[in-house]
């Protein structure tokens, strides 16, 4: 039996953080789906009213309030997921040298900061996660044949979900004074659909990178961090 190589002290499995990220993203998906169902019900009631069916006064306003309450809850869950995701990113990126990665484009701190700097956060977060995806393996092992296209789609859908949010539309309207509010519900639907898809891909990425780091570390050092 071959003796295990002493494990570097700086490797710590990101699995606990990954579990929290996955749980919060799952809740976000459920809430986003609930918002979509709420919008569908709202449109149905509007069409019923236009068709001559009786709708109690205040029903539509009450339903809009319920949708807004669901979106507020979703926003709070999204913020919590984002904070934990950044913690997972820092932990996973910090593990890369223990897996043999060299000449990394970012430090662990800047890997997180890339998500927070305006303008730069349109591109750099994708580069950070792409590097995590590529480098989460031992240098002596071949790069896992997993398509990076998943990372590209995740980031594209995430950016689309943010840009399609009606809140962004209202801010742009206030700044430019020339946007119309008529398409806000349509934007909301598109944004929620993009957010669901982005959350699913984020779950795949977080789960895959976490498992890959653990497997690579055990393969190289014969122990877990």
Image (tube, rainbow, N blue to C red):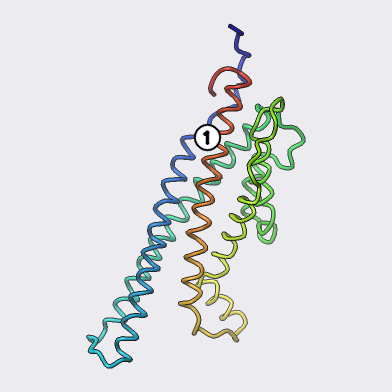
As drawn, 121 above or below 10: below
Could you tell me residue 14's position as x and y percent?
Answer: 52, 35
Could you classify mark 1 by the number of other residues whose Cα lies within 10 Å: few (under 14), some (14-19), or many (20 or more)? many
- Picture quarter containing residue 135? top right
Residue matched to label 1: 14
Q: Is residue 95 left or right of residue 140?
A: left
As drawn, 62 above or below 154: below
Q: Which residue is at 51% across, 40% downward? A: 207
As drawn, 137 above or below 72: above
Q: Which residue is at 33% across, 91% downward? A: 50
Q: Which residue is at 58% across, 17% downward? A: 222
As drawn, 197 above or below 146: below
Is the C terminus in the top left, top right, bottom left or bottom right quadrant? Answer: top right
- Picture quarter containing residue 55? bottom left
Could you tell me residue 38's position as x and y percent?
Answer: 35, 71
Could you tell me residue 51's position as x and y percent?
Answer: 31, 91
């Amino acid at each position: 039996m071959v003796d295990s190589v002493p494990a570097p002290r700086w490797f710590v499995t990101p699995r606990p953080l990954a579990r929290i990220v996955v749980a919060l993203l799952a809740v976000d998906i459920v809430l986003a789906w609930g918002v979509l169902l709420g919008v569908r019900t709202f449109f149905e009631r509007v069409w019923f009213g236009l068709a001559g069916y009786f709708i109690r006064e205040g029903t539509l306003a009450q339903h809009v309030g319920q949708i807004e309450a669901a979106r507020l809850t979703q926003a709070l869950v999204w913020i919590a997921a984002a904070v934990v995701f950044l913690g997972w990113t820092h932990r996973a990126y910090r593990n890369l040298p223990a897996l043999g990665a060299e000449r990394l484009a970012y430090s662990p701190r800047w890997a997180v900061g890339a998500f927070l700097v305006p303008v730069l956060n349109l591109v750099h977060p994708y580069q950070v996660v792409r590097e995590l995806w590529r480098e989460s393996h031992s240098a002596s092992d071949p790069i896992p044949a997993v398509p990076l296209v998943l990372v590209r789609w995740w980031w594209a859908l995430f950016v689309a979900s943010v840009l399609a949010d009606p809140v962004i539309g209202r801010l742009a309207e206030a700044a430019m004074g020339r946007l119309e509010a008529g398409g806000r519900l349509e934007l909301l639907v598109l944004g929620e659909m993009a957010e669901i898809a982005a959350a699913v891909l984020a779950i795949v990425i977080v789960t895959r990178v976490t498992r890959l780091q653990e497997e690579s570390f055990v393969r190289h050092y014969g122990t877990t961090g």
